[in-house]
Amino acid sequence: MSKSTIAVIAAVSAGTGAAVTAAMYSLRSKPADRPTAVATATTTVPVPTISPTSTATVPASKVFSAPPPTPAPVPLRTQPSATVVGPVDPAGLYQYGFPGPVADVAHRSALVSAYDRRTRNPHWVAEHITPASLAMRGGDRGSSNFVEDTAVPELFRAKLKDYFRSGYDRGHQVPAADCKWSQDAMNETFFLTNMCPQVGEGFNRDYWAHFEDFCRRLTARYPSVRVVTGPLYLPKRDPVDNKWYVKYEMIGSPPAVAVPTHFYKVIYAETAPSTGSGPGGNPAAPVALGAFVLPNAPIPNDKPLTDFEVPLEAVERASGLEFASKLPVQRRRRLCAEASCSLVIKEYGDRQKAFAKSGKK
Amino acid sequence: MSKSTIAVIAAVSAGTGAAVTAAMYSLRSKPADRPTAVATATTTVPVPTISPTSTATVPASKVFSAPPPTPAPVPLRTQPSATVVGPVDPAGLYQYGFPGPVADVAHRSALVSAYDRRTRNPHWVAEHITPASLAMRGGDRGSSNFVEDTAVPELFRAKLKDYFRSGYDRGHQVPAADCKWSQDAMNETFFLTNMCPQVGEGFNRDYWAHFEDFCRRLTARYPSVRVVTGPLYLPKRDPVDNKWYVKYEMIGSPPAVAVPTHFYKVIYAETAPSTGSGPGGNPAAPVALGAFVLPNAPIPNDKPLTDFEVPLEAVERASGLEFASKLPVQRRRRLCAEASCSLVIKEYGDRQKAFAKSGKK
């Protein structure tokens, strides 16, 4: 048992055969990278920090690093807490750094994302599309390249080599096609913090692409559409022992990036530009909400999209996230009750004809 | 495919058969619970908030809710960001609430913990033990009861019923036996935010218990010992397809709480009371670090503890956490080079004799 444990740990570890001692003594000492805050007895006022978000392809000035919702402000403990009761001070741990988790929230012009350092996938990526933004043409997909996000510390960063020959696509969470309004915006969608391993044929290149197109088409009816996209790791019941298990592949060598079992999209179709969308917004305007969960697997094009509609709470329960905690019930509408939640496959017509000839429904 | 997807989602969801519409409209509107912050163009100064940490068994005054490292401060967006460039404002999503993740950091007198709302296990739980704290006798384990942690929102809370008849122990991360110094302190270790599902026989009640005893024994040599404990979900290589998979059970109905594949402890043996440990501390004193990863499975008592020693970085890489980012390399020592990393099984002598008689090594 412990042999295999150590093998796993070794694999999860540096993959370099570094000895315990070497790893213990030579690593992890970059206190200047850590956010600090001034602690008082009853309040915390963080010192503003600028996230390291500059990258090779996107100018730092284009990256929204303020205000940064994370990393969380951590009290700098140089004295025992004034509120210590009892003989010990467990929060004294912070003298060695706050363990995390840190979600590496990135504020970019095209998207906002939160990253999961354990699965090396995003927790969520949020975008905003409007009729005007989709009409603009400044970006060309052929000029963008997939890039590692150096805003994430190296130890936790998804790498290009993790995806290489994995059999999975580098699946955009915010689609490149939603950010044609500038080359910089399109480039921002190519950070690996906007990617998850996705099944290519039948999913990322097919049904999922049609689903992304569905989101864009909503701008024909709604003046402002927000979409939050991310991975899920859902359990399945084992028919033999009747228990529930989560099982997912890890790609990379050593294994580093989780292959999600499912993906969700939460869609906010704003019936009027909301106060968060620009001047002239209406803070009381109804919002049509749609939540969808699709398996990371081939899906036939004739499968109705409504088969994948779920209660918003199901996505929240499975992801550990909350998507509408500040949206009053009286402003909520159900997207698929207002709009037709069906895909349009026409841009793949030729492929469909070929499918039909080969007998595929 | 989608049928089983929907079945899974339904199970992950309320488990009540609630219709999409009902779930969509009746839930998720408690804006008063949300932390808010005032955003300016370039800095964020969060309004101090007090976490809801009161519980049935521990007086709220005993819970360290200030300073709270999380939830992360979230800008309240009532105007488009001053830094918006381009036609869209993806961070306008925050008008509906910050999605998270929120780690529900709890500051208690006996422990500090961070919670994972997706797996419904802690990310980590930190404790502090000293010769003096272990010598105190104010708490009696028989007077403590396992309790749900109402500081975690109901949707994400681990429940007593999730563990009921699961076949797993409610395994303390900070051991009750480390907090005998007061009944309140011991009670604090019984929150489910300090628990993970652990294999009982051969692990939680045996090898893991001896390992916890090892940590306490370190206070014979070190005046101050900190221990951070938590779950891991490690991949294993499938011998058939040669790929790496993470697989873990989920207990509860609907499935809610993940069963970790492994557990880690990071031990900080402080050679002098550190500045975080009280007056008279030495900020330059060496710290002996030990990192261990054990499988959530029976382990024979004669297995050397050093078999489970790993580089600290291996725990960090697998957990997505950082444990010593502020501890300079020159202050670090390797625990198992300084101290004997071996278990003492004597308090289980009778059981050992029985084992010997039955032929077990």
Image: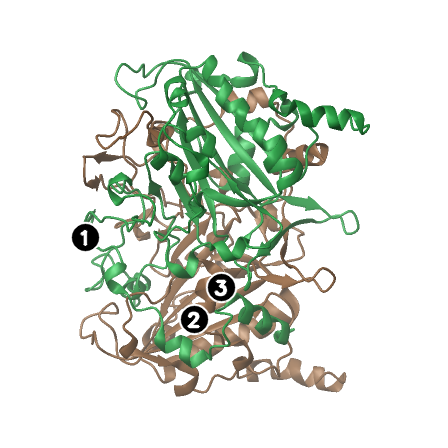
Chain colours: A brown, B green
Residues under labels 1 and 2: Cα distance? 32 Å
Task: Determine whether label 3 and label 2 are within 8 Å by CB.
Answer: no
Is any atom of residue B155 visible in this view? Answer: yes
Viewport quadrant of the C terminus of chain A: bottom right
Task: Determine whether label 1 and label 3 are within 8 Å by CB.
Answer: no
Chain containing mark 3:
A
In the displayed structure image, the side of residue B115 where residue B282 appears, left or right: left
Is any atom of residue A177 visible in this view? Answer: no
Which residue is at 39% across, 39% downward?
Answer: B187
Q: Position of residue A299 (x, y in %)?
A: 63, 74
Q: In terms of secondary structure, where does tag 1 sit?
A: loop
Q: Is the residue marked by circle 3 packed among few (<14), some (14-19), or many (20+) residues within 10 Å? A: some
Q: In terms of secondary structure, where does tag 3 sit?
A: helix
Q: Position of residue A6 (x, y in %)?
A: 67, 32
Q: Is the residue marked by circle 2 packed among few (<14), some (14-19), or many (20+) residues within 10 Å? A: many
Which residue is at 38% across, 40% downward?
Answer: B188
Residues under labels 3 and 2: Cα distance? 32 Å
Q: Position of residue A124 (x, y in %)?
A: 43, 59
Chain containing mark 1:
B
Q: Are marks 1 and 3 on the same chain?
A: no
Residue A168 in which image quadrant? bottom right
Q: Position of residue A15 (x, y in %)?
A: 63, 34
As shown in the figure, which amino acid type bears the numbered disc 3? Arg
Residue linked to disc 3: A141
Residue linked to disc 1: B41
As shown in the figure, which amino acid type bears the numbered disc 2? Leu
Which residue is at 48% across, 26% downward?
Answer: B267
In the displayed structure image, the side of residue A166 where residue B289 appears, left or right: left
Q: What label does residue A312 carry, if any?
A: 2
Q: Nearer the viewer, residue B358 or A20?
A: B358
Mark 3 or 2, nearer chain start? 3
